[in-house]
């Protein structure tokens, strides 16, 4: 099972503090933190601009079409998707009213209208009974930014309460860098960085004019994602290209035998006819109705489900040997990029869930210390001391690296490309070896040597920098030193 | 060399006005003849400028490619974003020119294949070094032989706004002031972003005509939903645009249609229909250009009318003289006295003129100061926000913002000048003062009035061959060659001051738009030149210093340049006015002498001249009624 040890410590600290506090802002804040930790799951916000494909991605991750998707912006309130033994929807209000249950859409999912004015709703919780989500994490779908419905502050507030972020961007660029800086300001503890942000290049099927052969389209997607990652280096750990519509189809069980049979029939058509059919929607519905026996309705369904890129991917997968429905779906999941994204989330977020959640909680507690009244001073001091000790835990120190990378991104900490690479590896590596930028099979001696070398390098850098920047370098040095010691 | 415009009446209008210019020339009023001729020529080559604006990745460049029917003209690869202004106009053979490079002040020719290197944001940064390859490119000018552009339509592609850097916005907004229409591009996959609408609102202040294009209808079958939502959002948030026309299109179908035209006409036709491009093409080619042409032709006719008035008044006076009207001399002397008073240094129009310009100077200086303060504030905010690219983006945006500001001030000044001149005529009866419109871009002027080598200093440039519209596209009446030759002949006499203005411009470095008032542009060159030298700034503090220095320099040099422009303009107008008045006084003096002479002439000898003048008046009357008729047709016809 997942490690909770750090969070357990924080919970214990909270419980201890609570016992000695009287009702007041300080106690409320501490209680909030304990409540936040009560759920043993990592909450991951999905943020991004208007119509970036967030909800489609959420559905793909959930494995169920619950979040409303459409041509125009459909998400108007934040929705927390969590595992629950029943499919149900709870509306939480701003004004302290008790939660209200509302019926799901027929077939499951968030209904078009919740029956309450948007301004009164804080957020909704959607209970998801399917096992795909498991207890792993809670996904928070947020309204798109930069919409005329002006929900940016609201989206930000939702994201603030999460531990990690998936930033969805169809076109990574200056806008996203700005957005990340804004997210940074509001996320709990402002610890947004490569440690807890994953970028998704969404809608790769729309890149260029969207008519390239699927592997070409994927290649373009990979290129754009790589450039985006470079641009956002230090702020996101990776940018994963995902054909979001295809991902949704491949994960959500809306794709059936009937669709598979239809695709196999299409796959038997000669290449020219196929090209003609796939030229446009009109053509798909009308060309070769007699020679390629798939009726119009099914063709329409395929298009709605997969889109042209998805259809091309499916045909390519069939050509490559996917012999039955499960294999086809597996291939589509792989090709859509969702498999990679899920792996990434497990590797980066879940593996570090304890540390990430603890970090958010600890930061909230540190902020709460300011609320202590004079008579609560001794409780605050004890808590502060406990938090300092906690902060020295190696796992948490890594999360602190977020500040270092942000300083670098701001231009306050000049680093050579090599040093920037070392920092990135340290922050995002999931094993000791990878944190040192080395392959997993490396020998202990090798790891020790590199750790010492790097520590030395950063010590030199530290001595050359002005005070504030020097502190950042010091943190990095300490972590390398710690690694070196732990390998002794 | 022949020319025609989109407007079906243009041939007739130009022929009529030419006859009026000829009459003026015959009557000895060469100045009026020259100015009318110049305006005729410009009206004859009227084109219009459409600025294409939209967010990154909404399909702007692809739309332009589709409009001109040239796949891949502007780069549209997956990650491309336009980073400079690109102008697309007609040329017989394809060409591209890059402006802004220090060692090529008149622009550097490049093959079309190299365009992406200068235009595309991603390609512009060398991946090996992370440095900008061509940091100083100001704009790229492309010429292609596209039928759409053959009648003078010019399309300007702009760096994507909205998700975008402040500096580019400043220049784009400034460019709008000189343009005829704004084509705002969105796509079918997302409704308006708040940032897009914010830009649109600012843009609308500068340009009355806005069209919307909704691209990628082939990628999203629910495009109509998006379009309707956009219209609804406009009604709620920007009602000014609620009635603007929308053109949903597919760039891909159009380009494929063009490619298929020769091999598979039936499919080509279907694709063209599916692309829905025809309504947009019609709007651009017919409605917009037609309307601009109508406006210009009407303006031309109004000016011609005024000249007829002048000529007729003179003819009438001549007749009175020949009729030995006893009160004639008295009325002439009265008018002379009026004019002498106008000529006097205490004349109220002078004071008014000085006043107006003082006022405009105050306004512009205040605009300049607040503009510079805002630029400085934005630059510092960008530096504070940080980011790894600031050492490129901050100098570049500073550059753009200052240029944008200068263009803005220039436009305002010019508009004021035009107003003042109109007032001079109306309120003080001082006619005949002309300030050439800001739209005289140097190359357009040169196209209209080609000078032989000996007539102009050689470095003012060569005449450019007038592009012949594609045969099928010509719809205006042809203007006979001899008419055009005569017009060119008259126009060459157009005021010495134009010529000296052009020379002055040529002697300064740093291209851009030409105008009569050139000092401000020259000064910008000095300020901007400084920015280029600072691209080496590495730290935030260095950048802050650069910003401070550049803005300081702007503060020190621009007000002076502005004042110089204003003084030049004021002097020009004043001296032209004085000249006109003096010329008038002299004319009247001659008229008095003539009257004296006539009194001594025998009745019989006066009959022939009288007949002549009556005939002249009859001709003028005919011309006047032609003008009136044409104006009426213009007003109602389209």
Image (cartoon, grey):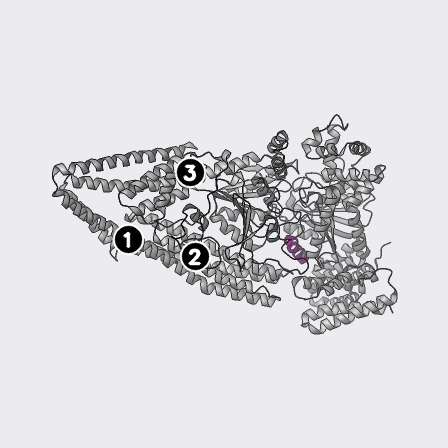
Q: Is residue A355 above or below residue B3?
A: below
- The residue that disc 2 covers is B505
How far apart in space, not on screen, are marks 1 and 2 (Cα)? 25 Å
Q: Is residue B243 visible?
A: no
Residue B294 circle label: 3
Chain of the residue under the numbered disc 2 shown in the image: B
Q: Nearer the viewer, residue B485 or B67?
A: B485
Q: Is residue B454 left or right of residue B89?
A: left
Give the mark nearer the N terminus: 1 vs 2.
2
Quarter holding the N terminus of chain B is top left
**In contact (CB < 8 Å): disc 1 and disc 3:** no
Q: Report if residue A177 lies within the magenta region.
A: yes
Q: Nearer the viewer, residue B482 or A379?
A: B482
What kind of secondary structure does the magenta stretch mostly adopt?
helix
In the displayed orientation, state which residue is furthest to the top.
A290
Q: What is the span of residues highlighted in magenta in the rendered image?
A: A171-185
Chain of the residue under the numbered disc 1 shown in the image: B
């Amino acid at each position: 099972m997942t490690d909770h040890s750090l969070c357990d410590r924080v919970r214990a600290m909270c419980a201890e503090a609570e016992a000695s506090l009287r009702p007041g802002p300080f106690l409320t804040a501490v209680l909030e933190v304990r409540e936040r930790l009560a759920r043993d799951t990592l909450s991951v916000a999905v943020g991004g601009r208007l119509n970036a494909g967030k909800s489609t991605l959420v559905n793909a991750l959930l494995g169920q079409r619950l979040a409303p998707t459409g041509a125009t912006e459909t998400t108007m309130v934040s929705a927390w998707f969590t595992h629950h033994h029943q499919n149900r929807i709870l509306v939480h209000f701003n004004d302290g009213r008790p939660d209200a249950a509302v019926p799901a859409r027929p077939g499951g999912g968030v209904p078009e209208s919740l029956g309450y004015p948007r301004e009164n709703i804080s957020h909704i919780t959607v209970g998801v009974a399917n096992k795909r989500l498991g207890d792993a994490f809670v996904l928070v779908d947020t309204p798109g930014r930069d919409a005329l419905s002006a929900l940016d502050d609201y989206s930000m507030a939702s994201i603030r309460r999460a531990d990690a972020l998936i930033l969805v961007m169809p076109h990574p660029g200056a806008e996203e860098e700005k957005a990340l800086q804004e997210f940074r300001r509001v996320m709990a503890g402002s610890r947004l960085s490569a440690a807890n942000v994953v970028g998704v290049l969404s809608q790769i099927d729309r890149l260029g004019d969207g008519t390239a052969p699927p592997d070409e389209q994927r290649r373009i997607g990979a290129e754009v994602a790589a450039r985006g990652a470079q641009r956002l280096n230090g702020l996101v750990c990776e940018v994963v290209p995902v054909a979001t519509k295809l991902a949704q189809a491949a994960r959500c069980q809306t794709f059936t035998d009937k669709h598979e049979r239809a695709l196999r029939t299409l796959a038997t058509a000669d290449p020219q006819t196929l090209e003609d059919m796939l030229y446009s929607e009109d053509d798909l519905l009308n060309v070769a109705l007699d020679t390629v026996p798939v009726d119009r309705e099914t063709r329409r369904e395929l298009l709605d489900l997969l889109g042209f890129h998805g259809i091309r991917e499916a045909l390519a997968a069939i050509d490559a040997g996917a012999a039955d429905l499960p294999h086809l779906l597996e291939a589509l999941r792989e090709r859509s990029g969702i498999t990679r994204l899920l792996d990434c989330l497990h590797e980066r977020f879940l593996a570090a869930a304890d540390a990430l959640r603890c970090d958010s909680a600890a930061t909230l507690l540190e902020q709460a210390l300011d609320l202590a009244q004079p008579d609560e001073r001794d409780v605050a001091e004890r808590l502060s001391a406990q938090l300092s000790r906690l902060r020295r835990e190696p796992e948490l120190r890594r999360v602190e690296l977020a500040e270092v990378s942000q300083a670098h991104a701001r231009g306050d900490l000049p680093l050579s490309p090599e040093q920037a690479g070392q920092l990135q590896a340290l922050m995002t590596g999931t094993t000791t070896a990878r944190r040192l930028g080395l392959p997993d099979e490396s020998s202990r001696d090798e790891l020790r040597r590199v750790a010492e070398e790097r520590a030395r390098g950063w010590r030199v850098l530290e001595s050359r920098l002005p005070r504030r920047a020097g502190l950042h370098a010091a943190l990095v040095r300490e972590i390398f030193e710690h690694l070196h010691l732990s390998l002794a | 060399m022949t020319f025609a415009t989109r407007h079906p009446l243009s041939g007739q209008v130009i022929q009529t006005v030419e006859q009026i210019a000829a009459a003026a020339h015959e009557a000895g009023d060469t100045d009026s003849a020259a100015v009318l001729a110049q305006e005729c020529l410009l009206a004859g080559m009227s084109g219009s400028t459409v600025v294409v604006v939209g967010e990154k990745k909404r399909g702007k460049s692809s739309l332009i490619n589709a409009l001109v029917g040239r796949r891949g003209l502007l780069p549209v690869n997956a990650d491309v974003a336009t980073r400079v202004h690109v102008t697309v106009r007609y040329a017989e053979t394809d060409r591209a020119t890059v402006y802004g490079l220090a060692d090529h002040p008149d622009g550097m020719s490049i093959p079309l294949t190299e365009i992406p290197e200068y235009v595309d944001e991603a390609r512009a940064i060398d991946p090996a070094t992370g440095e900008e390859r061509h940091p100083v490119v100001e704009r790229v000018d492309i010429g292609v032989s596209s039928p759409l552009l053959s009648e003078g339509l010019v399309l300007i592609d702009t760096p994507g706004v909205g998700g975008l850097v402040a500096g580019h916005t400043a220049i784009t907004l400034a460019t709008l002031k000189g343009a005829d229409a704004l084509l705002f591009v969105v796509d079918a996959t997302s409704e308006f972003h708040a940032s897009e609408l914010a830009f649109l609102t600012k843009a609308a202040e500068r340009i009355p005509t806005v069209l919307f294009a909704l691209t990628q209808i082939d990628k999203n079958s629910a495009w109509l939903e998006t379009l309707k939502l956009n219209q609804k959002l406009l009604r709620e948030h920007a009602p000014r645009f609620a009635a603007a026309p929308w053109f949903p299109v597919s760039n891909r179908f159009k380009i494929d249609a063009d490619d298929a035209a020769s091999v598979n006409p039936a499919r080509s036709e279907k694709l063209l229909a599916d692309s829905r491009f025809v309504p947009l093409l019609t709007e651009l080619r017919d409605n917009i250009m037609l309307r601009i042409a109508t406006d210009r032709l009407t303006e031309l006719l109004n000016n011609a009318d005024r000249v007829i008035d002048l000529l007729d008044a003179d003819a009438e006076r001549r007749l009175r003289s020949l009729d030995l009207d006893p009160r004639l001399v008295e009325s002439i002397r009265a008018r002379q006295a009026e004019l002498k008073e106008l000529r006097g240094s205490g004349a109220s129009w002078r004071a008014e003129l000085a006043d107006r310009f003082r006022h405009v100077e105050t306004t512009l200086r205040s605009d300049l100061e607040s503009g510079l303060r805002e630029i400085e504030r934005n630059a510092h905010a960008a530096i504070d926000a940080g980011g790894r690219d600031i050492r490129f983006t901050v100098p570049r945006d500073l550059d753009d913002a200052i240029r944008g500001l200068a263009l803005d001030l220039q436009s305002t000044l010019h508009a004021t000048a035009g107003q003042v001149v109109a007032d001079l005529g109306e309120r003080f009866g001082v006619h005949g003062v002309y300030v050439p419109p800001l739209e005289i871009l140097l190359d357009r002027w040169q196209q209209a009035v080609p000078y032989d080598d000996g007539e102009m200093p050689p470095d003012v440039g060569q005449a450019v061959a007038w592009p012949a519209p594609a045969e099928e596209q010509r719809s205006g009446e042809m203007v006979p060659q001899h008419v055009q030759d005569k017009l060119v002949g008259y126009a060459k006499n157009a005021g010495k001051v134009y010529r000296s203005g052009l020379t002055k411009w040529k002697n300064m470095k740093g291209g851009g738009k030409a105008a009569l008032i050139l000092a401000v542009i020259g000064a910008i060159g000095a300020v901007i030149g400084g920015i280029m030298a600072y691209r080496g700034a590495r730290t935030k503090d260095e950048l802050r210093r650069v910003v401070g220095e550049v803005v300081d320099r702007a503060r020190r040099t621009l007000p002076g340049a502005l004042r110089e422009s204003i003084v030049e303009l004021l002097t020009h107008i004043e001296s032209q006015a004085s000249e006109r008045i003096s010329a008038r006084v002299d004319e009247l003096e001659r008229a008095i002498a003539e009257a004296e002479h006539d009194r001594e002439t025998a009745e019989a000898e006066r009959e022939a001249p009288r007949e002549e003048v009556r005939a002249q008046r009859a001709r003028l009357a005919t011309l006047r009624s032609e003008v009136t008729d044409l104006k009426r047709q213009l007003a109602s016809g389209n």
